[in-house]
Amino acid sequence: MADRSDAIRNRHQQEQRGTSDRGWYVDGEKLEEFGIESWKASEGNNYIAIIPPHVADRYFGEEIYVHYDVGVRGSALLCPSMMKRKYCPICAERKRLQSKGVADEDTLKQLRYSRRWLYFIVDMRDDETEAKGIQLYDGPPTIDKAILALSTDPRDPENGPVKDISHQEEGYTLIFKREGTALNTKYSAFVLEKFTEPLKDEWLEQVPEFEEILVWMSADEIEEEFKGAADPEPKHQAEAPEEDDVEVRTYDTDEEPEAEDKSQEEKVNEVKDKVRKRSSRRGR
Ligand SMILES: [Zn+2]
């Protein structure tokens, strides 16, 4: 019987990896080629098995640094400065604004990078989720901290015995609870549950390298995305407030802006709000 399930699932996937025109640091097409979906922790309990990388002595999680909400398209891009010690136009701009002291906290915050952790996992909730095979989990640093705490000896984390929760036979399912949404999301009740059966050979064979699914942009491409040059319509909206913003901020501090300029500032803020809302509506 034909139904809408596939269409809804596809739409869900599209939503998860961002709208098609928006830059994203995970290559959606590559994931599709590998037959890997993005996994998100659901409200309540979660059960994941981390699939080990092919390289035997490599850590199973990949630390990434991401600039979110970049430019008018609200793209999310890897920070070349934090990840490859290369020039990052966004970090450079943040430093420039910071040293000039012309930007407010929000603007500076907007230009900051966020730390995330990627894992290839299998959802061990039930047979159905397990049958989905490998999925990509893009989690906050809290998850990795919890994994480390559970994998090491609390009395001697540096030299004591460690558990490799991604070990094919001797590994563990990570169980944790997610509560709340967006900025109020909390993760708690982390426990490990020993595998009752080993991870499937096919998972270990199929798991990609993180490098294969990450999207790297050149400094020029980041710059372009950042300035919003790719989209002429919104570009005007997004750049105008920036220019005006600087003007508004050149007032002598003890001088009251004139009425006309005040409304100018309000206008600028309105446009800024709109731009911000537009990009945040696209979700993260
Ligand atoms: Zn950066």
Image: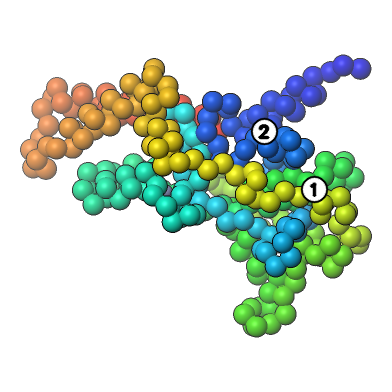
Q: Residues within 10 Å of mark 1 (few under 14, many from 20)?
A: some
Residue 2: in sight, yes or no?
yes
Q: Residue at x 84, y 18 (%)?
A: 3
Disc on the earlier residue, 2 or 1: 2
Q: Is mark 1 within 8 Å of ligand 1?
A: no
- Residue that label 1 marks: 206
Query: How far from the left and from the top, in percent, is residue 208?
Result: 72, 48
The amino acid type of the residue labelled 2 equals Glu
Q: Is residue 147 left or right of residue 64?
A: right
- Residue that label 2 marks: 29
In-front residue for pair 198/128: 198
Q: Residues within 10 Å of mark 2 (few under 14, many from 20)?
A: few
* SS for callout 1: helix
In-front residue for pair 201/76: 201
Q: Residue at x 74, y 65 (%)?
A: 56
Is label 2 in contact with label 1 (beta carbons under 8 Å)? no
Q: Quadrant of residue 131?
A: top right
* SS for callout 2: helix
